[in-house]
Image (cartoon, grey):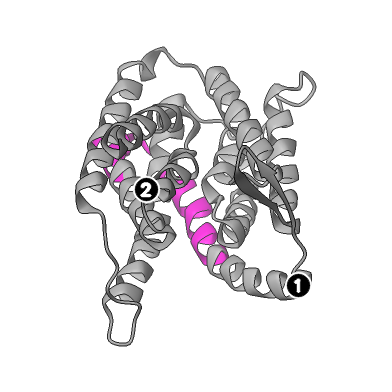
Amino acid sequence: MEFVVVPLAALIASTLSFYSGFGLGTLLMPVLAVFMPLPAAIAATAVVHGSNNLFKIAMVGARADKDLVFKFGVPAILAALAGAWSLHLFTALSGEIAWTYDLLGRAAVITPLKLLLAALMMGFALFDVHPALKSVKFDRRYLPVGGLLSGFFGGLSGHQGALRSAFLVKVDVTPEAFVATNAVIGFMVDASRLAVYAYTSFAPGGAGGLDFPGTIVAAAIAASVTGVLIGLKFLKKVTIAAIQLVTAAMLGLIAVFLGAGLI
């Protein structure tokens, strides 16, 4: 069953995330977690996500906006470290605050952090669909600020791709540059994550013994690459307005699921 469900989820999520710049990891990880332990699902998702971004870079990386990559990407990576550390502080301050309920036999957990991120994502989604807001553009001088915000909240919650896309879609770029720049910055973050996973899994005194699901990961990577090829086929026909719409829909969807405690 997993060799049907996981690749199908990877294909759909990869195609959608090709344009939005996020969502592959968010949508794929819960599916993988159904078929394997959570630590293995997280590591597997990172490998699929990193491979997906690497393939996108090979296909469209030359079109990346280097100014965006440097001014937005570098602050984002640095801020992600601060966000990850803040997660421990936030968890300590919020204590054991959580609300749980049962939905179709599955326990859903709502926390203050999830509600905060859901509200933030929904706010960005409104920027892309509200008539008075969707034409707003961010000046490039604020790129480092956008990188710091997306990186910090990414480190805090893991949803850095959603916040990154919400900001970059408001910068004056072509659809090709948007997709390519997102892929380059996303891969920079993935490389950092994978280095940590590798160290904690294989270093002396690390977690070790992680039962990595290589075969299913290979199937998911193949499906995600197919999704990139599908997205690439229609890239020249896509406008930045269409990307804004896809981004808003993905932000809203993830915000609802996150706020409801389902992811």
Between 46 and 169, the one lying in front of the other is: 46
**Residue at the right extreme of this rendering:** 132
Q: Which mark is residue 35?
A: 2
Q: Quadrant of residue 212?
A: bottom left
Residue beneath disc 1: 95
Residue 106's place in the image compared with 227, above or below, is: below
**Residue at the front extreme of this rendering:** 105
Residue 253: image x %, image y %? 62, 32
Residue 260: image x %, image y %? 70, 42
- Magenta segment, principal secondary structure? helix
Mark 1, secondary structure of its residue = loop
**Residue at the top extreme of this rendering:** 237
Quadrant containing the N terminus in the rendered view: top left
Q: Which residues are magenta?
A: 54-79
Residue 4's place in the image compared with 162, above or below, is: above
Q: Amino acid at mark 1?
A: Gly
Packing grade of label 2 (10 A; few <14, some 14-19, many >=20) is some
Q: Is residue 106 in the magenta section?
A: no
Q: Is residue 60 in the magenta section?
A: yes
Between 18 and 90, the one lying in front of the other is: 90
Left or right for 9, reference 110: left
Q: Amino acid at mark 2?
A: Phe
Q: Write the residue at 32% across / 28% down.
A: 227
What distance separates the C-alpha of mark 1 from that of mark 2?
A: 30 Å
